[in-house]
Amino acid sequence: MQLPDEAIVYHLPGLLVPAVEEWTPAAEMRAKHFLQPHKIKDLAARLMQVRSHIATERDVKNPPPEMAPIDAGFIDYPQRTLDQFRRQPEAGVLGRVMALAARLREQVDRVVILGIGGSYLGARTLFDALKSPYHNELPAKDRHGTPRIYFEGNNADNDALHDLFELLQLTCVDPELRDERWGVVVISKSGGTIETAAAYRAVRREFAEYYGSNSPLLTQLVVPITGATGKLRDLCLADKFRDEDILTIPDDVGGRYSVLTAVGLLPAAIMGLDVRALLLGATAMTRRFFDEPFERNPVLLFAAANYLMFSECAKPIRVLSIWSKKLEALGLWYDQLLAESLGKHCTGPTPLTAVQTRDLHSRGQQHQEGMRDKFINNLVVKAPKNPPIMIGMSDKNQDDLNQFNRKGLPDVMAAALKGTNQAYYEAARPTADIVLPTLSEHTMGQLLQMLMLATVVEGRLLGINPYGQPGVEAYKRLMKAALKG
Ligand code: PA5
């Protein structure tokens, strides 16, 4: 059951042409660059059709070639996983995820997570959003049994992997001690992505050097997450992993839609996050998507505003302006989701992540006065987790801050958001706000599901298949050829 104050809302007054406005040069610009409110209302009927279409797509098993692929499995996966957990707490996906996470937490103090794209960004998002940025530096007792986490295999960067191996060699000397042991989660749906595969090969070598070649610890301290078939699975079976040691990514869930499968859930559980709350948040959002009327439906409102800004107001650049440092990785995750889902047939919005207030000091000038090609979605977390850090009084007032002594950093952030939105409004730069009541597993589950569902809705509105990424195959093919040459 979702409490109203836990629910995400989407506000769009910053992009609507006011009903009545006296003529001024700025009002004229708003009439040109903002949306006439009737445009949103006019779209409602089409959105209802798209929603029904998406509901029926969930049951399509073998789509005709012109509709393929349809990877709609992500929509019901959170609910199915929770239902299965209620029926079979140990044997289902969630039970296995929890057991494997508990095993790793018990046995190692460091976990290296290998994966790229959809097999990386979701776990990274959850780590950054919900753990301390200094997690790895915290003393063991303050990490409450959760290992340090490292992400690799998301690049072919020699020195980055080298530096990780160096760290492991310097800090892990005795493989008998839990505090000096490290484990691995290797994630690749296809099982054939070269960045991840090459990193895993190097990590296996490092593993053999530390724990001994043919050590039975391999199948204990390494957890593979992969598709039902593929080279990674074959390699693991050759390494004597049992089927139950391998977590399977469902066929009908695409890589960038897989954060709420084992791909994101196992890393989250290792980090000590409440994976059930993540899934509950996602199911609450799915329910709202299918049940809520348009005016209160964050998925449909978000898809409608963004679709209209792109297709009717000539705003090809989609800025996700994030008002919490902890959500920068969410921005990168959304960059991938949008770019790979809708960047097809020479069209599709171009995503751009900005983190505020940091990037007001870099991109702010351009967003205020540069080309009128941007639509800005603010992503705002209403309540910080920790008590406010106050400006306070000081006997040295050379910085002139005593006048704000009763204000804290959350007030500075709120004032910056208000001021920036006002400045954009006055300059006829359209904005909208996604508001999260707080940062938690439940709100993150909602947010991830909301953005995935909205991307599918937008794709269907644009006539673009949001699933599949045929374009990335070209570079992969040529890269392999270059490597052979
Ligand atoms: O969305 C996608 O499918 C891709 O971005 C993949 O996640 C990415 O290419 C990694 O693929 P794999 O999990 O097969 O290694």
Image (cartoon, grey):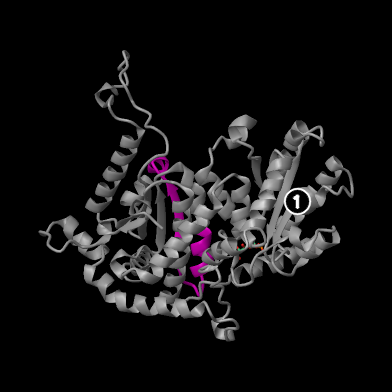
- Quadrant in the picture for residue 142: top right
Residue drawn at point x = 31 percent, y = 51 percent? 369
Q: Residue furthest right?
A: 213
Closest to the observer, 363 or 393: 393
Q: Position of residue 161 (x, y in %)?
A: 72, 44
Q: Position of residue 130 (x, y in %)?
A: 51, 44
Q: Residue furthest bottom?
A: 64
Closest to the observer, 211 or 272: 272
Q: Quadrant of the C terminus?
A: bottom right
The residue wearing badge 1 is 222
* Residue 46 visible, this orientation: yes
Residue drawn at point x = 40 percent, y = 75 percent? 51
Q: Quadrant of the N terminus?
A: bottom left
Using residue 91 as the reference point, say whether residue 23 is left or right of it.
left
Q: Residue furthest front?
A: 87
Looking at the rendering, the stretch of residues picked out in magenta corresponds to: 335-362
Amino acid type for the residue under numbered disc 1 = Val
User: Is 399 above or below relative to 249?
Assistant: above
**343 inside magenta stretch:** yes
Q: Quarter for ligand 1?
A: bottom right
Q: How many marks?
A: 1
User: Is 467 above or below relative to 243?
Assistant: below
* Residue 349 visible, this orientation: no
Using residue 322 as the reference point, say whether residue 171 is left or right of it.
right
Q: Residue furthest top?
A: 395
Q: Position of residue 388 (x, y in %)?
A: 37, 32
**361 inside magenta stretch:** yes
Q: Residues within 10 Å of mark 1 (few under 14, many from 20)?
A: many
Closest to the observer, 423 or 483: 423
- Quadrant in the picture for residue 480: bottom right
